[in-house]
Image: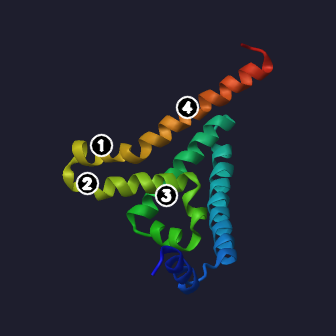
Amino acid sequence: MQPEEYQQLVLHNSPRRPLVKNAIMAFLTGGLFCLLGQVFLDIATIIERTEMEAAAVTLAAMILVGTILTGLGVYDEIAEIGGAGAAVPITGFANTVTSAAMEFRREGFLTGMGSKIFIIAGPVIVYGILSGFIVALTKALLTGLL
């Protein structure tokens, strides 16, 4: 059988993905996480003195939610249903880092959890800083500061 024939056979026999259903579920899941974040922000705005402090508390609360749901094994089920809606928010990042820590906890705090967390977090931090620098540089160039 030729590779082209095989590809046609695979395409013909592969199950169709429910793209519309997946998009709706991702939208709803991400929306529920955003709603939860908004509730935390509204509560933190009442408690904290500034908006920046309220935002920091909200981010910490959402990271805590993602970590707890991962530790309880619930986040994977949410991600199975919600797809990208569960992966995109900061709770998804917390899930990824917590999963790496849980997977390597038997190797110890330093060589296991401590080092394996940065396998996931490291690239995010590096590219986050790099993209922030590029945006700031672009803004400075466009406004004539440089």
Q: Is residue 66 above or below residue 139?
A: below
Q: Judging from the image, what secondary structure is the residue with disc 4 in? A: helix
Amino acid type at circle 4 is Leu
Residue at 20%, 48% (x, y): give it: 108
Q: Which mark is residue 105?
A: 2
Name which quarter of the figure residue 56 lies in. Answer: top right
> Is the C-beta separation of discs 1 and 3 under 8 Å?
no
Comparing marks 1 and 4, which lies closer to the viewer? 4
Comparing marks 2 and 1, which lies closer to the viewer? 1
> Is the C-beta separation of discs 1 and 4 under 8 Å?
no
Pointer 3: what residue? 66
Q: Is residue 135 above or below residue 61?
A: above
Pointer 4: what residue? 130
- Mark 4 residue crowding within 10 angstroms, few (<14) / some (14–19) / many (20+): few
Comparing marks 4 and 2, which lies closer to the viewer? 4
The x, y position of residue 11, in whole percent, is 57, 80
Q: Is residue 26 above or below residue 98?
A: below
Question: How many labels, in total?
Answer: 4
* Residue reaching furthest to the right: 143
- C-alpha span from label 4 to label 2: 30 Å
Amino acid type at circle 3 is Gly
- C-alpha span from label 1 to label 4: 22 Å
Pointer 1: what residue? 115
